[in-house]
Amino acid sequence: MQTLELTPSALALHKQVNQTHVPYPDHLSVGELFSRTVARHPNAIAIWHQDHECSYQQLNIHANHLAWYLLAKGVQPGDVIAVSLPRSTELIVALLAILKAGASYLPIDAGWPEQRIHEVLGQACCDYLMGSENTRHDTRFSRYHVLAPSAVAEATEDRGDPPLTIEADAIAYINFTSGSTGKPKGVPVPHRGITRLVYNARYACLDENSRLLQMAPATFDAATFEIWGALLLGGTCVLYPDVYIRALRLQHILQTQKISVLFLTTALFNTLIDEMPQALDSVGTVLTGGEAHSLRHMAKALERYGPGRIVSVYGPTESTTFATYYPLCELRNEDTALPIGFPIQNTRVYLIDQDRLCEQGQSGEVCLAGPGLSPGYLGLPDVNRERFFECLIGERQERLYRTGDRGYFRGDGAIVFQGRTDDQVKINGFRIELGEIAYHLNRHPQVRQSVITVTESPQGEKSLVAFVIAVDPSCCPEQLRLSLATQLPAYMVPRHIQLCEILPLSATGKIDHRRLLSTLHPLGEPAYDNQ
């Protein structure tokens, strides 16, 4: 076990920040907790989807019926069942049924390449796949036992929960994240991680009066919060009715369905703030995260919505969706980045630099601890030893996860995000922080939004590239370069600044750097991208 170097002041700082313990049902499974919620609120509306409502009692009857069907088909506790269903009441029934049967769900996207689907299901040792009737006839899935919920006879009475004892540390679901080796990494998440996420939440009010919008793909861990943040506490999970997010449609749903808590990716949040800020006027709490926030967008949001309604949230999949939160109450003149804030309930954060606990103001790697942590990546023992480690901090034994993110403690105990450890690139011998370039570029009055990345020539020469959404199409990239040259050393000024109308998003709502680079014009060609 590793022992960190520390000073009394560094230890005291971390002890103060990490006073996050609150009671929560850490010994119960998600299925058991849902059943208890049904007993308290049987007639409350659990799901709204396209003008159809489903009560807690109805949802429980359908989930129990499907759970018994799964067991009859040979599903054993501990099995992994892939799920490829569109956002629907049927999807929620399937997830609940899988958990009640003692299995784990693995959301997949039928639009993935066949090779990725087989890679993911193979890593998870998955033999079962739950999908639509069309899935049964899809040759890509011929090697799996395909189960279609629609083929199960309609439940007429509740058979009750299957008589299984499901431990809180059993795996509830598996999400796959991109891996640096080119292969996706499977992140198993225990039941306890979900309950720790939603019970007695510090970052938002979650109770029987909550109405949460479920908009994220099931393959994205934000869906964990959107679904279980409602269903384990007696609230209503409102399913966004379309595949694609459209601002006018979103505004209509938010207002007519009286959404009280909403999660938006950073990119979608920025788009709404720029193009349709009124869409969020009726929402009680807007959570946003996934990428570093723009201070300009946050300033506009603070001015329009007032203090406390916008909450920045941060957390990797490996810590069950959220790990820290920061309510936007003010922006300080000296701020160069929005803090990622304070640890959420039952979560601990440590900043570590070269095996030493950081003091206030000292930069270090963000390491996370607590019941939200994954037990480790599937089938990657070497990576697990690198990213998850046992550590003695003072007199406390902790299991920590290295996030690969860097930050420092501000005077009030909030953590300020400083970028990825791998966001620090080295070009021609110079270490460069991409976030620092973006900060200065985003402050330019002609810049609405920007992304900084690195391109590499066939000869291996690296250079900085900036993709910019301009306030005015007449904006001149060369003027932006000249402006940056007055604020940054020459080696930090992007060689190429390309204007674009949009910043393409990935399926999880984050900026898609690969697609951006595919649109890059060679130097000397027109720099405006009319994509």
Image (spheres, grey):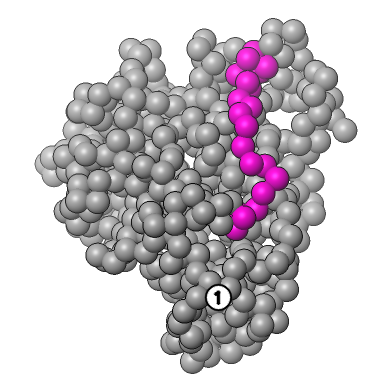
Whether residue 20 appears in magenta in the rendering, the answer is yes
Number of numbered tags placed on the structure image: 1
Whether residue 40 appears in magenta in the rendering, the answer is no
Q: Residue at x 56, y 20 (%)?
A: 408
Q: Is residue 203 left or right of residue 120?
A: left
For the stretch drawn in magenta, the main secondary structure is loop
Q: Residue at x 52, y 54 (%)?
A: 39
The quarter in which the C terminus is drawn is bottom left
First to last magenta residue range: 13-32
Q: Tell me which amino acid carries mark 1.
A: Leu
Picture quarter containing residue 403?
top right
Query: With respect to residue 361, does 525 lie above or below?
Result: below
The quarter in which the N terminus is drawn is top right
Query: With respect to residue 309, does 103 lie above or below?
Result: below
Q: Is residue 133 left or right of residue 497?
A: right
Q: Position of residue 500 (x, y in %)?
A: 24, 50
Q: Position of residue 309 (x, y in %)?
A: 32, 30
For the residue pair 438 and 297, the one nearer the viewer reads as: 297
For the residue pair 432 and 174, the one nearer the viewer reads as: 174
Q: Position of residue 174 (x, y in %)?
A: 62, 60
Q: Which residue is labeled 1 in the image?
A: 66
Is residue 135 visible in this depiction of the protein? no
For the residue pair 262 and 246, the one nearer the viewer reads as: 262
For the residue pair 229 and 516, the one nearer the viewer reads as: 229
